[in-house]
Image (tube, grey):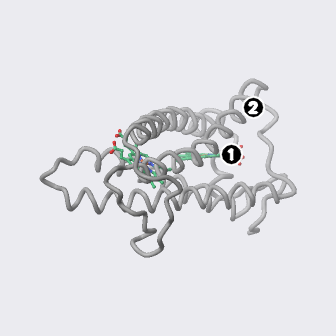
Amino acid sequence: MSWRSDREHWGLGIRLLHWLTAFLVLGQWLLGLYMTSLGPEALAEKFVLYQRHKSLGLVVFALTLVRLVWRASEPARPDLPPTVPVWQRRAAAATHALLYLLLLAMPITGFLAAAASPLGIPTLLFGVIPIPHPIGPDARLEALLLAAHRTQGWILAALLAVHTAAALKHHLIDRDGVLLRMVRGR
Ligand code: HEM
Ligand code: HEM
């Protein structure tokens, strides 16, 4: 089992980063919806969950940077099977590029929104490491950034629905091993 990808296999590095990110992003999504639904009667819980959401989102950002550098440094990666038509190859490449973009953009809008909040709550990674805010309180900017963050969340959800449906189609209908090679590498 190799850490690096080649023409036939996804390496362990990419597979770990893929599934860890998938797990975290799903969690972030559910956490985002849940924490925003809490009312003033659950203020303490709401505060804790917002801080956790901020920290985990910054972890997604860091993992995505590592993943893009790792990916770029690999000499080869498996191609889709020859049976896959050109339009599906293009659709897959476009979906993946947009997913990477959102994995970076969502933490950026979320972080800047938190920084622009007039509440002025500092960002402490897991309550320990301070992450300096590049901008100060600005209610109008905060509202804009939060609207962007929410819109990005829905676009991400739509892309993931397509992505997951495509992976399941490869597995259940085409039976071409595309899903299994992201799980087992082969
Ligand atoms: C938050 C969730 C997810 C994100 C952000 C995500 C993102 C990505 C990205 C960016 C790639 C492209 C890899 C590359 O070429 O660099 C990829 C590949 C892949 N993903 Fe996901 N993914 C997610 C969830 C899932 C799920 C739930 C499944 C399966 C049910 C899945 C199955 C696959 C497969 C099979 C590939 C490899 C495609 C190939 O071999 O060309 N992903 N994913
Ligand atoms: C992959 C990363 C992330 C995902 C998938 C994500 C997803 C979400 C979702 C689904 C919501 C609920 C939106 C709504 O309907 O109101 C939300 C809210 C929020 N997120 Fe994120 N988020 C991510 C990263 C971050 C980061 C890094 C921060 C800050 C450092 C952040 C800050 C916030 C804030 C402050 C809200 C509350 C918005 C409000 O009060 O209306 N997010 N996020």
Q: Which residue is mark 1?
A: 177
Callout 1: helix, strand or loop? loop
Sort mark 2 into few (<14), some (14-19) or many (20+) by Cα contacts within 10 Å. Answer: some
Mark 2 or 1, nearer chain start: 2
Task: Name the residue at 42% across, 58% down.
Answer: 54
Q: Amino acid at mark 1?
A: Gly
Callout 2 amino acid: Arg
Q: Residue at x 55, y 32 (%)?
A: 162
Separation of marks 2 and 1 at Cα, in angstroms: 16 Å
Q: Position of residue 160 (x, y in %)?
A: 53, 38
Q: Is residue 45 left or right of residue 11?
A: left
Question: In the picture provided, is 113 more to the left or to the right than 85?
Answer: left
Residue projecting furthest to the top: 87
Q: Is mark 1 within 8 Å of ligand 1?
A: no
Instruction: Say which quarter of the image contains residue 71.
Output: bottom right
Percent position (x, y) of residue 13? Answer: 69, 64
Determine whether the residue tagged by mark 2 lies in a helix, strand or loop.
Answer: helix
Q: Nearer the viewer, residue 53 or 117?
A: 117
**x, y percentage for residue 124?**
43, 68
Q: Residue furthest right?
A: 75
Kindly identify the residue that appears in the image at 24 percent across and 44 percent down. 37
- Quadrant of the snapshot with the C terminus: bottom right
Q: Residue furthest left?
A: 41
User: Pointer 2: what residue?
Assistant: 89
Name the one closer to the observer, 19 or 140: 140
